[in-house]
Image (tube, coloured by chain):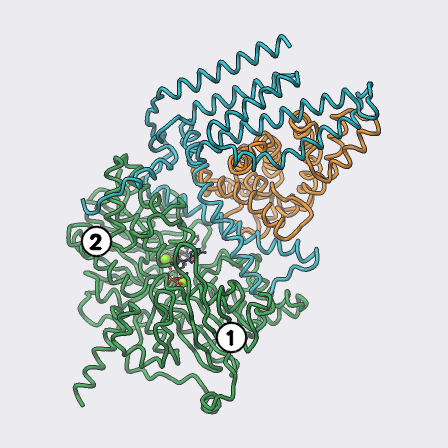
Amino acid sequence: MTIIVNNLSFRYHDSSVKALKGIDLEAQPGELLFIIGGNASGKSTLLLCMAGIIPHLVTGELSGDILVDHIRMGENGIQQERPGMALQDSDTYLFEEVFQEIAYPLVNQGASQEEVSDSVYAASKSLGISRLLHRSMSTLSGGERQKVAIATALVTKSPVLLLDEPVEQLDPDAAHEVLTILQKMAREGKTVIVTGKQGDFARKYAGKIVFLDNGSSVRNISAAGNIFDDNPARHLSAPNLKVARESSCGEQLLEERDAGTLSPVVKFEKVTHLFQDGGGVEEIDFAIKPGEVIAIMGPNGAGKSTLLKHCLGLLRAQKGKTFIFGEDASALPSWKLAQKVGMLFQNPDDQIFNERVDKEVAWNLKVRGMTWEQALSEAKKVLEELGLLDLCEKHPHELIRSQRQLIALASVLVTHPDLIILDEPSKSLDHKHVREIMDRILQQRPSRGAVIIVTHDPALAWLYADRIALIVAGRLAGIGNTEDILLDHVRMEKAKLSRHPFVMDLHESNSDVQGEY
Amino acid sequence: MNFRKSVRKKRRLTMNKRLFVTLIPVGIGVNIVGGLLAQTLKLPIFLDSIGTMLTAVILGPWLGALTGLLSNLLQGLFTDPINIPFGLVNAVIGLVVGFLALKRGFEDYVTPLIAGLILSVLAPIIGTPIAVYLFGGVTGGGVDLIYTVLLKAGNEIFASAFLARVPANLVDKLISAYLIMAIVRKLPVAMKGYAVPGAKRTEKITA
Amino acid sequence: MLYQVPKEQKKLLPSFPSACNAPGIGAGSKILVLSLIIISLFLMHDWRQLFINLFVLTMLSCLCGVLRPMAGRVKHFIFLCLAIVAIHAFFNPHNDHFIYFIGLEGFHYGLKTALRLLGIVIAGNLLLLTTEVTVLVRWFGRINSDLGMILGLSLSIIPVMQRQMATTLEVQSARGLRRDRMRDRFFAFVAVIVPVIVKSIIRAHTMAQLLYLRGYDGRVRQERSSLIRQDWYLMGFGFFYFFMNLYFSIHL
Ligand SMILES: Nc1ncnc2c1ncn2[C@@H]1O[C@H](COP(=O)(O)OP(=O)(O)OP(=O)(O)O)[C@@H](O)[C@H]1O
Ligand SMILES: Nc1ncnc2c1ncn2[C@@H]1O[C@H](COP(=O)(O)OP(=O)(O)OP(=O)(O)O)[C@@H](O)[C@H]1O
Ligand SMILES: [Mg+2]
Ligand SMILES: [Mg+2]
């Protein structure tokens, strides 16, 4: 089906600015259309309009029209048939069991039991999740859940596929697989529309790229040329390889550290925590030195999030020990550990409960016994540093997700923790925001502390990490200097990172260099 | 005045009609999680009907009542089927809170007081006959002590069972109602549904 | 076919609200029989009849092979029943005749209530132990598809919310939340329940979008359920049981 968007504008009913301002766009069957843009640029809104969720379920002021096969889209979305769609929030699902979740759209279409089982198995097999079919959704890792969401979109065989950031939590290999499947489906004659924050993937897989900037200007860009040289789109691409990495440690600290005079910030000693139905971490053994930034990378479901929870006493090791600044973490209550460790969780909504932004940030100090006045003035300071001062009086839930994530970050930073942990910061934030917060953190990082970043984005590790620890299937698969690890073919393949465009470029340019010599 | 009405109408429209299919399960979940959390934190009260109250505030009295009924039904199916008849009490909680919220919103200090006071009498009026018929008035808790004392003093079974329940209910329902008020205040406007009170809030919205 | 579907996986399908049929005795006839049993228990006022009923129900659970789990569920009601008998024996205001200090009227009243309570508990659990919750939920879905969907979604959202509560408790502890004093604990209740509620409401909105996308429209998509022979036997037994008890309730 051909989808033509004509001068489409939309304003959410409780918002004063338009989320979409006169969008024109055309999607042909047979091509993979990538819509890229930074946070709050209106990608999700545009897809919701195409799916008919706006105006059917979400109200607001809508103008312009969407033509599907030259027929104006009615109130009920794309004719009778619903498009196959994966929403951005893959943590929300309908049923407990993975099988049911994927099968439900088919059951609703009145398919027979045979058909349902066959299609579900075919779809899940192509995404490599058939072994998860009988797990319950709530025990899956973030990436595994995202794959399930994609499977529910693929299973219906509808001619239109809309996928909102399908690869934001996937490891590069899985992302490659998903995007290849989508390319294939497009070639088979479907209309496939994918959104994303990362230019890298778009450049490699898209048939056509549309760049969305602040809900307004849409520019069609051909995938071939080097699109990211023009200004507005630049922040979406991985940094240029020639950008010099700054060493983030002070010279003196480096010397001290190498002489071994400083005790490690975190020390994992044969940490083992295995879950009943598979997954978890096993015999993890490494230390994080003061002053360093370490990236933890690895495939989906490898146990990265599980390992981090040990630093805060949220999980206790079944075997082995975790030491934080020399103290055994399992012996201390979480709130005590929280005085030294600040963690930015994957989802800011797990914690926000105050009705004002500044109160939310100040709350971290308030529970430590500070008075409201003092706490609020401290909070203001941090918010000002992060450039969020004008949000002070807003309700956190009226902000967009990236801003909420920044507020959660502010509430971590306000207590000046020595160890800062970021769990997939680039999941909901675009490059620009991630770099802003990383710069901020590195600026005010206490010299003896450390920063841990969990990420699937090698570019982020390249820019900021001193070392990389690879975790594969619950075990430590390598740890070393960033360059060494990222340039190591074998390890990259094992950690399912080798297919990331950035890593491929890196290896390519490196082999060039070697060729020259 | 007219203006306020239109704002209010607009807000109702923004809550999609079919949303109740997913909001009622949330209410049921809040009932269960609230009770669980009160236990986890070792609070001395039950707090296991805040989900009903919340749905009643957001979706109105009738769907609030449905939430109460269904949440006892599900708890009955999972643990003790004997919970099921007490769903009536839970439904009445939904009705009372729902109508009050429709009339006056649920964000001032007075409405929770009214709700708490009404419920501390109404809930036992419905609950007592069920408890007397099923359990002879004994429910295996601290209330039984008051019950026996009242019986011993020569009161009728129903009267004693009723009177024994009022104080505990008064505390529980009052605290629950005020908690709901605190929670509703912290909700973003778009989620409040029917809980939009009078002029004050409206001005805030449009400002 | 890309993949051979193992046999046991096909069984999974029935757990959808209002989708396909489960094999075996229908939930509907079981619920009918349960209501007949409970109505007859309400009609009885003689402790001997109640006692015999209790015995029959116990035998029935033995027959269904659920005696052991039944014992586990009934266990904590035994104490309650003893308390009912004791309290009424000693303190019932209608006590006129006494053996030592045990009032006969109160004792009778307590005994009847206790026996009836046990009967109801056993009958109710008999249904639950022989029928999966999902099957019951599907039965409700037959009455009304919205109702079935609400119950079905509750089954999936309750574990999510429990986990969410645990997560939020974790996260707030990580931010420094304490819970030693009573005041702190009330405060902690709000600090945990508010994010759980807000997130669940957001989740409800997203779930509504998902329902729309997956083609749910609130229409009843009924499949005729056919009664098998066992259903008729069971219902026949139910009515026999009911009328027997009715007869004795009137004549005793
Ligand atoms: N439910 C909503 N109510 C009000 N405003 C909204 C809502 N959802 C989005 N918006 C606004 O619409 C604009 C576009 O948001 P949208 O979610 O489409 O961006 P996005 O490109 O998908 O961003 P992200 O990369 O963070 O997913 C934002 O300014 C946001 O504030
Ligand atoms: N509470 C739990 N119960 C059972 N299994 C679990 C639980 N939590 C996580 N797992 C399993 O443990 C494995 C590791 O999960 P974890 O969340 O640590 O992965 P991850 O490395 O963070 O992956 P991702 O990159 O996808 O977020 C997964 O296979 C997951 O299914
Ligand atoms: Mg989006
Ligand atoms: Mg993770």
Image location (x, y in percent) of residue A185: 19, 52
Tell me which numbered mark, 1 or 2, is placed earlier along the sequence.
Answer: 2
At horizontal 21% and vertical 53% (from top left) the residue drawn is A27
Q: Describe the element under mark 2 as helix, strand or loop.
A: strand
Q: In this view, does A363 lie to the left or right of A318?
A: right
- The chain ID associated with circle 1 is A
Chain ID, cyan in image: C
Residue A12 in sight here: yes
Left or right: residue A482 compared with residue A355: left
Name the tint of chain B in the rendering. orange
Residue drawn at x 43%, y 76% is A286
Residue A402 vs residue A228: left or right? right
Q: How far apart are marks 1 and 2 (CA)?
A: 47 Å
- Please say if A253 is above or below C98: below
Residue denoted by label 1:
A419
Q: Name the residue under label 2.
A: A27
